[in-house]
Image: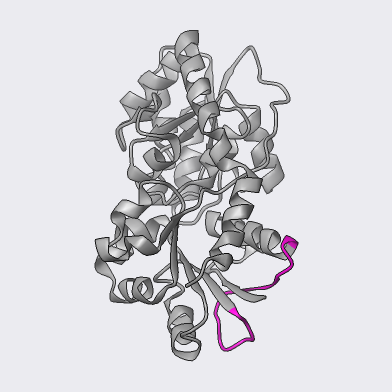
Amino acid sequence: MRIALVTPYLPESRNGNAHTAVRWRRFLRAAGHRVELLTDWRGQTADALIALHARRSHASVRAWAEARPDHPLILVLTGTDLYCDIHTDAQAKWSLTVASRLVVLQERGVEELPPALRAKAVILYQSAPAITSGRRPARHFDVCVTAHLRDEKAPFLAAEALSFLPDDSRIRVRHIGGELQPGMAARAAALAAEQARWRWLGAQPHGATRRRIADSHLLVISSHMEGGANVIVEAVTAGTPVLASRIPGNVGMLGADYAGYFPVGDASALAALLHRAETDPAYYIVLQTQCAARAPLFTPEREAAGVRALLETPT
C-alpha cells in the first residue's frame, strides 16, 4: 500500500510530532508499505492518508476527503488538538468528522472527543526501545527536564523549584530543549546565573537526550498541556521514574493512581516531591515500581502492531 504520512513538522524539528512520524514511517515500511513523509498532501499518489494534527493538517485532510472519500483517512490527535483546537476551531472539528479513524496517544484522550465520534477512536501509545542506565552519580541526585522552551511546557518550573530545597540537597537539574519562543533563551541564561544547580543544555541529538534521561535519577515533565508525551515513554523505558504535572495527558500515560503528580505550575509542590524522592528510598521505589508496571504499554512491538492494525481495520 502507498501511504501519505502528513506531519506539520519534519524530522529536523526534533519535536514529538516529528519523532512520531519518523517512527510510524519505519514501522509501516517494515510491514512492506511504501510511505512518503509530507508536510502537505497535494494529490500525490497514495492509497491511505495518515495525518498528524487536526488543525495544522486540515488542508491535507480536506483535500483527501474530497478527492478520495472511499480511502482510509487516519487522523492522529496531538495535545493541542485534544485540549484546545477540537473544542474551539471549526477546521479541527471538521477534520474529526471525516476521518476514518481517530488516534489518541493515551487513555484519557478519548474523553475529549465528542461522544458521537468516540467509536472511531483508537488508543495507541508511543514507544521507545528499552535502554539501561550507564551510571547514575552517587554524589548528586540528577534530575532531567526535556522540553523545548515555550510557555505550554512550563520549562522553568524545575529551576524555580530548586529555591524551595534545603541547602544540603544533592539535587541538580539539567534541561534539554531548544528555544521555540522568543526571549526564552535569555531567561534561561539568567536562571542559570542565579541558580547554580540548574543548567540549560540547549537542543541535543536524540541519542544524547535518551542517554541523559537514562543516567538521571528522575525526569520532570511540568507541561500545562500534553497529548501523550513521548518523553514519559523514554523515561519509563530507561528505568527513570517521572514526576509529572497532574494534567489529563500525563495521567493518561502514567495512570490515575501514580504517586508522582504535582499541581500544574506549583514549584513548591514539585520541590516537595523532588526532596522526597531524594531522601525517602521507599517513595523512590514506589515511583520505580509504578513506572515499570506501565512499561509494557510502551514497547516498539506493541506500537508497530497498532500502527499496522489501523490500515487493516475496515473503514
Report the residue at 51% width, 45% height from top. 147
Of all residues, the one furthest to the front in this rendering is 314
Residue in the foreground of this view, choosing between 143 and 242: 242
Magenta stretch secondary structure, dominant: loop
Is residue 100 something one can see in this rendering? yes
Task: Name the side, left or right, on which 127 lies relative to 245.
Answer: right
The stretch drawn in magenta includes residue 246: no
In the rendered view, would you say 210 is above or below 227?
above
Q: In the rendered view, how is the structure colored? A: one colour
Is residue 14 something one can see in this rendering? no
Task: Name the side, left or right, on which 189 lies relative to 261.
Answer: right
Report x, y in % for residue 195.
Answer: 47, 27
Report the residue at 61% width, 66% height from top. 10
Task: Name the side, left or right, on which 169 lies relative to 21.
Answer: left
Residue in the foreground of this view, choosing between 267 and 95: 95
Report x, y in % for residue 62.
Answer: 43, 83
Report x, y in % for residue 226.
Answer: 41, 49
Please identify the quadrant where the N terminus is shown. bottom right
Report the residue at 62% width, 53% height from top. 305
Report x, y in % for residue 294.
Answer: 51, 33
- The residues colored magenta run 30-47
The stretch drawn in magenta includes residue 41: yes
